[in-house]
Image (tube, rainbow, N blue to C red):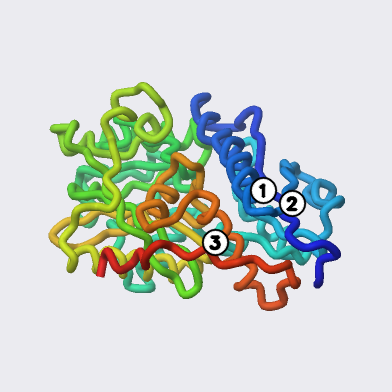
Amino acid sequence: MRPAEPKRVVVLYNETEELNKGEPQDLIADRGVIACAHAVAEALESKGFGVRLVTTSLDLLADLAPYPPSEYVVFNLAEGLNGRFFEEARVALTLEAMGYCFTGADGYTLATAANKARTKTLLERAGVPTPPWQLFRSADEVPLQPMYNLPFPLIVKPVSEDASLGIGPDAIVCDLESLRRRVTYINTRYRQAALAESFIDGREFNVSLWGNPVEALPLAELDFSAFPNPLERIVSFAAKWLDGSFEYEHTPVICPAKVDPRLGHTIAETARAAYEALGCKGYGRVDMRVAGGMPYVLEINPNPDISPDAGFFRAARAGGYEYAGMITRILTTALQDEPHRPAFGTIPLVSPQHHAYDHIR
């Protein structure tokens, strides 16, 4: 399809007023996308694009009716809507069905990533290391005797949440009774199964990836040196979202990470394998921990937070990009990946100051 007027972009996002599950503070994470959407819109406008900010509802067809796919490309930032499961995937699938060219991952990848158990199964089949795990649908499924294939300590998470929702100090369990309590908490508060995963005591890295062919931006490492107890070294909800908390103030990120080049290469290649195994597209972030020289993938985040203060831009900046250049490149990648993309004006590729992946070779 050919747009009647070039350089038109819908920045699509969600405005959640209340959640149907979880903790009240989780709303902070859900509403973070609002500021991000405005930052993305401002960045695109600075590059000469005509931008419309559109919020999603349950009727996406009506939301987008004034902005036909023949004239607009969608910068898709839509996530959950009031805490509903798989809302992010529903939006992407609907965009596909309506014929839009849009940024980021497709609906299938987003649906897979939304379920940590399904993601870990896929990683295992692809030969990508990930910590051992088990799913518990209720505390009654926790055995009476220690699990020799899943030794303590464990970290217990909601199976279908991201953004560190449900991750606090009590998420680390060291005995069967603590595991039962945490499974019950996840089942009741988040209304879903709990995933218990071996706690990897090691360095934690984030790897931001983008483009086609995919390339890794400079590695980032979480600095947990303020936490003498290894079991307290986690990216909890407080560390990620609660400005002013001890965890938030004492979990800085070092980017580029100071890492041996050989280990850095192994981390980047493991992240690339995870990204490709999940079918990510456009941009994404892989979180992992390293123990004994082996990187273990913890999470894969297709369409991660790209706010000016988020980790993805931190890595892009270390790779030589300013914010508007990063946003333009994400949009350009979507247009290049679209096999029947519209002739969307002339959108110049924004080149980094240097090839970021060179840092970790």
Residue at image mark 2: 50
As helix, strand or loop, the secondary structure at mark 3 comes to helix
Query: Marks 3 and 1, how far apart in space?
Result: 14 Å
In depth, the one of 273 and 173 nearer the eye is: 273
Q: Residue at x 15, y 33 (%)?
A: 229
Q: Is residue 39 above or below residue 94?
A: above
Q: What residue does disc 1 label?
A: 45
* Lower position in the chain sequence, tag 2 or tag 3: 2
**Tag 1 or tag 3, which sits nearer the N-term?**
1
Query: Mark 2: few, some, or many residues within 10 Å (few <14, many ≥20)?
Result: some
Three-letter amino acid code of the residue under disc 1: Glu
Q: Residues within 10 Å of mark 1 (few under 14, many from 20)?
A: some
Residue occupying the point 63% across, 39% down: 38
Q: Are marks 2 and 3 in contact (CB under 8 Å)?
A: no
The reply, left or right, for residue 216 in relation to residue 24 is left
- The residue closer to the viewer here, 246 or 94, is 246
Q: Nearer the viewer, residue 63 or 145?
A: 63
- What amino acid is at disc 2? Gly
Determine the CA span between mark 2 and mark 1.
6 Å
Tag of residue 329: 3
Say what secondary structure mark 2 lies in: strand
Q: Tag 3: residue type?
A: Arg
